[in-house]
Amino acid sequence: MTDIGERLRLLRLALDMSVAAQFAAYIGIEPQTYNNWERGRQRPQLDMALLICRRVPGLTLDWIYLGEAAGLPMGLNDKLIEAAASLP
């Protein structure tokens, strides 16, 4: 589950949201729920993952669950790569 959490953190950073609560508000869920996902304590259920995909244009379930970037738009993929490069 931590891989999913790491990808969600990367997505949040790619969208210039430095605080998890910002992203939780953006997708319309409780901050604690999002924190549990990002920390790998729980995995987002399919309906919640679809909600994230609806809020982030071009995001795919394949990327959230499997890390497959092939279906992502180039702009989003570039932002994710930049965010990954900025991590310590």
Image: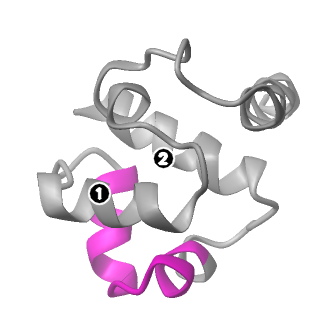
Q: Which mark is residue 8?
A: 2
The picture places residue 13, in percent across and down from the top left corner, at 72, 52
Q: Which mark is residue 84?
A: none
Q: Is residue 34 magenta?
A: yes
Relative horizontal placement of residue 86, taking residue 24 as reference (left or right): right
Q: Residues within 10 Å of mark 2 (few under 14, many from 20)?
A: many
Q: Between residues 85 and 55, which one lies in front from this camera angle? A: 55
Q: Residue at x 75, y 66 (%)?
A: 18
**Amino acid, disc 1:** Leu
Relative horizontal placement of residue 23, taking residue 54 as reference (left or right): right
Q: Residue at x 38, y 42 (%)?
A: 5
Q: Is residue 11 magenta?
A: no
The picture places residue 42, in percent across and down from the top left corner, at 16, 52
- Looking at the rendered image, the disc whose residue lies closer to the viewer, 1 or 2, is 1
Secondary structure predominantly adopted by residues drawn in magenta = helix
Number of numbered discs on residues? 2
- The quadrant the N terminus occupies is top left
Task: Find the magenta span and give its range.
Answer: 23-38
Spatial CA distance of label 1 from label 2 is 13 Å
- The quadrant the C terminus occupies is top right
Which residue was labeled with disc 1?
50
Is 80 above or below relative to 66? below
